[in-house]
Amino acid sequence: MQVLGAEAASARSYAYKASLIGSAHRFELTEDGLSWHIAGRSGLWRYDEISAIRLSFRPVSMQRHRFRADISRTGGGRIAILSTSWQSAALMAPQDNGFREFIVALHARMAQAGSRAQLTAGLGHKTYAAVLAFLAMLTVAMAGLLIRALTIGEFAGALFIVGFAALFAWQVGGFVRRNQPRSYTLHRLPESLLP
C-alpha cells in the first residue's frame, strides 16, 4: 500500500454547516473508505464503490467564492461537499484550505484503491449549452440597446450599458470559464475548481 503524503494525511476529516439550522455535515477518510455523517444519517462508502465525482464552482449571493464536490456511489446515493460553512444569519465563511486538502486526499485514497470512478468537472453539457445560449441572447440584446443609445445620442445611457456589460462579463465570465464541462484524472485535478 502506497503511503499518503503529509498534506493528504493531514486532511483526513472535513466538516461544514450547510444551513444555520441543523448539525454540521462531517466527512472522514478512513482505511475502509469515506465515512459521512449528514442530518442524523451516516454511512461508509468504500473508495472503490465511489462511481463518480463532479467538481464545480458554485457561487451564491452570500459567498462569491464557493466550490462543490458531488460524490456518487455505485448502487445509488449522492452526497455534496461544499467549501463554505454558515457561521451566522449574515455570514457564510470560506473553508478553502480544508476543502482543497480533503478533496485532494480523497482522490489520492481512491487512486490507491484502484478506483475507476467517472471524474468530471464543471456543469453538465446540456446545462452549459443552455448557459451559453442565454449569454448569446443577452449579448445580442445588449448590443442592440447600445447601438440604439448611440444612434439617438444618449451617450450617458450608452456608457451605462458598457459599464453594466463589463461588470456582468467580469462576474459571469469566471463562472462560465471555471465550469466548462471536462473530464479529469485522479492524479490531475482541475486547479480552477479547487480553492
Image (cartoon, grey):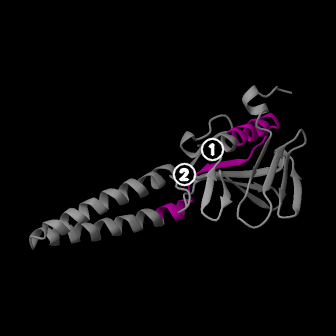
The residue tagged with tag 1: helix, strand or loop? helix
Residue type for callout 2:
His
Describe residue 27's horizontal placement relative to residue 32 as left or right.
left
Pick the residue in front: 117 or 136.
Answer: 136
Magenta-span inclusion, residue 136? no
Which quarter of the rendered picture does the N terminus lie within?
A: top right
Pick the residue in front: 61 or 183.
Answer: 61
> Which stretch did the figure color magenta?
101-129
The percent coordinates of residue 51 (x first, y second) are 76, 52
Residue 65 - label: 2
Describe residue 130's horizontal placement relative to residue 101 as left or right.
left
Describe residue 185's horizontal placement relative to residue 146 as left or right.
right
The mark that comes first in sequence, 2 or 1, is 2
Q: Quadrant of residue 151?
A: bottom left
User: Which residue appears at 52% of the width and 53% of the height?
Assistant: 179
Q: Are marks 2 and 1 in contact (CB under 8 Å)?
A: yes
Q: Which residue is mark 1?
A: 96
Residue type for callout 1:
Asp
Count numbered badges in the picture.
Answer: 2
Pick the residue in front: 93 or 186.
Answer: 93
User: Which residue appears at 87% of the width and 62% of the height?
Assistant: 41
Inter-mark Cα distance, 2 to 1? 9 Å
The residue tagged with tag 2: helix, strand or loop? loop
The percent coordinates of residue 2 (x first, y second) are 82, 26
